[in-house]
Image: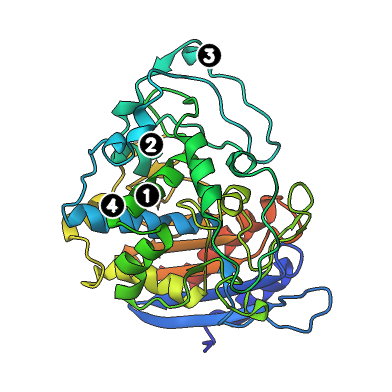
Amino acid sequence: MSADFAQPALNRLIEKHLPRTFPALSVCLMRQGEPVLHDAWGWIDPETRRRAVSTESLFDLASVSKLLVETSFLVLADAGKVSLDSRLVHVLPEFGQLNPRAIGSGQDPHTRNFLAIEAPYRGGTVDPVDVTFRHLLTHSSGLPPWRSVYLLAADEPPPSPAPGQPYAAERWRKGLAAMVDFPFAGAIGETVRYTDIGIMLLGEAVARLQGCRLDQAVRELVLRPLGLSTFTYNPLINGIPRDKIVPTEYDDHWRHRRAWGEVHDENACGVGGIAGHAGLFATAADVARFGQAWLTGDKRLAISRDLRANATRQQIRGQFRLGLGWMLKADSDSSAGDRYSAESYGHTGFTGTSLWIDPARQLVCAVLSNRVYHGRDPDGIHAFRRAFHDLIVEAIDPR
């Protein structure tokens, strides 16, 4: 279904970015609970153009996956199984075994080079026992932003995925064993250091609290209650045809193949495809429905009104304005553009995905692309996101 909503301007914007910024795009825009734009553009195979993208195509969500795991944790918290200020070691006791923990450095996720230790922390230590779940949700744990977990999880990359291939549980065990001993990058609770490592540990905590593997926990706590059937980890392994899955980047560093039906993120792939920070695939419609459940406080999403309000309220400010898992609209240069209201919240994904919610306008917008297909230059996707979100607000609410 596609409305005439802002169509000429929308077409011009998409033509400017397709196929160079991304060869595939799918959008689902909802206002007051009703879809006003649901469409797809581009090609799954941009070189041959035999397979057009459709609204049923699955995209690699990258860090938008975090929202599902963080929401799962909040469901568990509201059920009284854990609290925001519970210590991580109460669920993952091995996180506290190496104590005190040195303050060292993280790695740049793009160059993989180790970063310099921040001057105030050289020679310092922290007590890992002090890390709480609130710290993880607000990226203020002091943990390193990124480390090459995938190289510590196994000696070789996983094989190219095939239907029915078993889950590589040993990869996750080895990766987790490394993560619980990593040096910190700074003090606990001081500032925001956006960290995949922290959310990977949060994912393990969700799995243990629910008593099952993380993918099953997310399904039981969020996906099944909301009827979100397209969300899946490891889609190709789980029997989804390759033609329904949008490919991402050719990995010339580690896998030496294009990521197609397997998660783009190296760490998520290296630990078996199921992780807290990345790994989910879905359609734009299901991502929008998830956002709509947050916007309206859908009773099937078992999170109280107070906790939902707290999650979308600023908890800390640093590299980002953050709620509990949710990114809040920045004052300037936001990927949500300039016209979304100040109380808007959302999240972006490295592969070119995003979900933004504007409560003032009752607006939910899921924009999924594969902007890493040609490489990792962020300028094109950032410009597209800002222009797209400004365009839709101008069309809907030009005041």
Quadrant that contains the C terminus: bottom left
Point 66% across, 70% down: residue = 162
Mark 3 and mark 1 lie on one chain; the one further toward the N terminus is 3
In the picture as drawn, the residue positioned furthest to the right comes out as: 48
Q: Position of residue 186 (x, y in %)?
A: 45, 23
In the displayed structure, 51 sits above or below 302; it is below
Residue pointed to by mark 1: 325
| Distance in Å between CA atoms under marks 4 and 1 | 18 Å
Crowding around mark 1 (Cα neighbors within 10 Å: few <14, some 14 to 19, many 20+) is many
Q: Helix, strand or loop at disc 2? A: strand
Dot in front, 3 or 2: 3
Q: Quadrant of residue 358?
A: bottom left
Q: Which mark is residue 119?
A: 3
Q: Which mark is residue 317?
A: 2
Mark 3 and mark 2 lie on one chain; the one further toward the N terminus is 3
Mark 4 and mark 1 lie on one chain; the one further toward the N terminus is 4
